[in-house]
């Protein structure tokens, strides 16, 4: 199993973060969240990142970001 995190540019200048776990080639445990760059990320999404052993992100990144692409 491998967990991933991607960033997408959303409408109105917002950023969407998408995380999932790859289980035998299928995307499982999908979570999406959208917010304005620079605003805090809710605790529940940060908890998901922690559970998946991904880097903690306190604020929505500014687009584009090569780290999450």
Image (cartoon, rainbow, N blue to C red):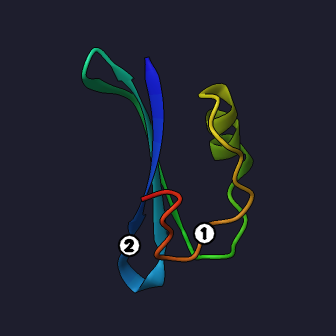
Asked if 63 appears above or below 2 in the picture, the reply is below
Asked if 57 appears above or below 5 in the picture, the reply is below
- Identify the residue at horizontal 60%, vertical 76% (top origin): 37
Disc 1 marks which residue?
A: 61
Asked if 62 appears above or below 41 in the picture, the reply is below
Near mark 1 (Cα within 10 A), the count class, few <14, some 14-19 or many ≥20, is many
- Residue 46: image quadrant is top right
- Residue 47: image quadrant is top right
- Identify the residue at horizontal 74%, vertical 47% (top origin): 43
The one nearer the camera, 66 or 54, is 66
- The answer to whether 7 appears left or right of 42 in the picture is left
- Tell me which label, 1 or 2, sits earlier in the chain: 2
Residue that protrudes farthest toward the front in the picture: 66
Percent across and percent down for residue 49 are 63, 38
Percent across and percent down for residue 52 are 59, 28
Q: Which mark is residue 33?
A: none
Q: Which mark is residue 10?
A: 2
Q: Secondary structure at mark 2?
A: loop
Q: Secondary structure at mark 1?
A: loop
The one nearer the camera, 66 or 22, is 66
Q: Nearer the viewer, mark 1 or mark 2?
A: 1
- Residue 55: image quadrant is top right
For the residues labelled 1 and 2, the Cα–Cα distance comes to: 12 Å
Percent across and percent down for residue 21 are 42, 27
Asked if 43 appears above or below 21 in the picture, the reply is below
Quadrant showing the C terminus: bottom left
Quadrant showing the N terminus: top left
């Amino acid at each position: 199993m491998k967990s991933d995190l991607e960033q997408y540019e959303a409408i109105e200048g917002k950023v969407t973060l998408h995380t999932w776990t790859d289980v035998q080639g299928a995307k499982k445990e999908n979570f999406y969240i959208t917010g304005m760059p620079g605003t805090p990320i809710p605790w529940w999404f940060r908890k998901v990142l922690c559970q998946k052993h991904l880097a903690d992100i306190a604020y929505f990144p500014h687009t584009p970001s090569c780290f999450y692409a």
